[in-house]
Image (cartoon, helix red, strand yellow):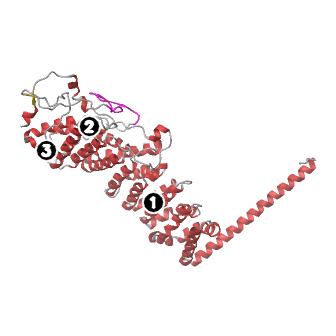
Amino acid sequence: MFNKIIKRGHRKPSKADAIDSGLYGYGPAGNRNSGMVSTSNVVVNHASRTAPAQSVVDSAPQPGGAVIDPTALPSGNIDPLPPFRDVAVSDRQLLFLRKLQICCFQFDFTDTLKSVREKEIKRQTLLELIDFIQSGSGKITENNQEEMIKMISVNIFRCFPPAPHENSGSEMLEIEEEPYAEPAWPHLHLVYELLLRYVVSSDTDTKIAKRYIDHSFVLKLLDLFDADDPREREYLKTILHRIYGKFMVHRPFIRKAINNIFYRFIYETERHSGIGELLEILGSIINGFALPMKEEHKLFLVRALIPLHKPKALALYHQQLSYCITQFVEKDYKLADTVIRGLLKYWPITNCTKELLFLGELEEVLEATQSAEFQRCMVPLFRQIGRCLNSSQSQVAERAFFLWKNDHIVSLIAQNRNVILPIIFEPLEKNVRSHWNQAVHGLTINIRKMFLEMDFDLFEECQKQHEEMEARARELEEQRELTWKRLAEAAEQRKGEDGITV
């Protein structure tokens, strides 16, 4: 039946027939600054995707009995092809290829009234392809797998429009009022769904698929994580995670490529839309790390994850980052000291919002910290906590006091109170005497009472040392004032001797 449908009369080839292989060309994705993508077969201008269609497929019935070459791309209007169920099983692979050719055309979605019929044909064709793969109606030939990946590449690998902050020259906003919506999403999400179904299908042979889902494809897929549309990043997250799970040969490459994205974000641009999604993938990957942990993974923690606390846009991805950091400590408790010292290294000085995030993450890390690792870092740690207790920003001070509500942290503090109480006794006394916020004042009284009940003798000793320190400070202040007074008298006397009047 299908042969009757695709048999058509001979016709004179048009100029559009010359683009058959070029139509499938694809280049780097995600580059906001380059508009032309060149391959050996074709130059695709992704920056100007305004034509109704780069070419069209004519699959309408024609008189005659000649068979159309499936590798050639006829010209004319895009017409729908028959459903898979209406053709013989032996003809479905050829029909699959023809449907792929239709799906290679891209349209201008900024104008909703333009090419409405053609857009709907492509949408329906994509749905049929998805259903064909999902239903397992037939194993796709190797050639069709290659052509499908090329079609997917033509659709998803593209240049992004400049971000709003790039046009205005302003800093990237931490929270956008309205997320960007990709105009081509009605087709784009179906292409992503097709790729996802292909990757997760039990009929997909990784030995064959890895020839087409190769390092170049994965790298371009990672570039797309900078897309502004959160729906696209969500699809990319799912697809990349599935690729990582199914294609073991790509795992080291994917981890290294994600590392490089982080390095560029931290040390060069501080602008990337998909850091949170990449961290979500890594959270799952870290959870599967075998013990003892490889040195490569520990270096990733030190060189990439911990420095991610530095950028201004931390709030956009902190939840995912905190989960990854905590996973490392739960996997290998010996890394707690490294993580805590890393947090202290990047601790914010004037950004109270970031400081609240740091305190929340610190509590999660301390929850998984053992006594030996806690002892290695407790001195610098509680010096910083002491500064937080004295913060004039009441939320920061209250969040620091909430650490004492965690039973595990209180247990660690109690075991090492001889070191910790002398460090934070002065900040506590300062709060009692001069902090402006009543809630902070009340929390300070409660913590002082806790230490007093925990070890009365130690508390008395610390109080005595604090009073002696204050006495010495007053004595030094008196000596300083006396010295200045003597200098002022000497200056007045010198003026009188020189006959200088003021």
The magenta stretch spans residue 39: yes
- Give the quadrant of the N terminus: top left
- Label 3, secondary structure: give it: loop
The magenta stretch spans residue 196: no
Residue lying at 7% horizontally and 33% vertically, measured from the top left: 4
Q: Which residues are magenta?
A: 32-50
On residue 139, the disc is 3
Question: What amino acid is labelled 2 in the image?
Answer: Val
Q: Nearer the viewer, mark 1 or mark 3?
A: 3
Q: Nearer the viewer, mark 3 or mark 2?
A: 2
In the rendered image, which residue does mark 1 sit on? 361
Residue lying at 56% horizontally and 54% vertically, measured from the top left: 349
- The answer to whether residue 196 of the structure is visible from this angle is yes
Relative horizontal placement of residue 215, taking residue 168 as reference (left or right): left
Q: CA distance from mark 3 to mark 2?
A: 33 Å
Place residue 379 in its image quadrant: bottom right
Q: Nearer the viewer, mark 2 or mark 1?
A: 2
Q: Position of residue 292 (x, y in %)?
A: 34, 58
Figure check: 168 above or below 201: above
Is mark 1 in CB contact (under 8 Å) with mark 3?
no
- Label 2, secondary structure: give it: helix
Other residues around mark 2 within 10 Å, as few (<14) / some (14–19) / many (≥20): few
Q: CA distance from mark 1 to mark 3?
A: 48 Å
In the rendered image, which residue does mark 2 sit on? 116
Question: What amino acid is labelled 1 in the image?
Answer: Glu
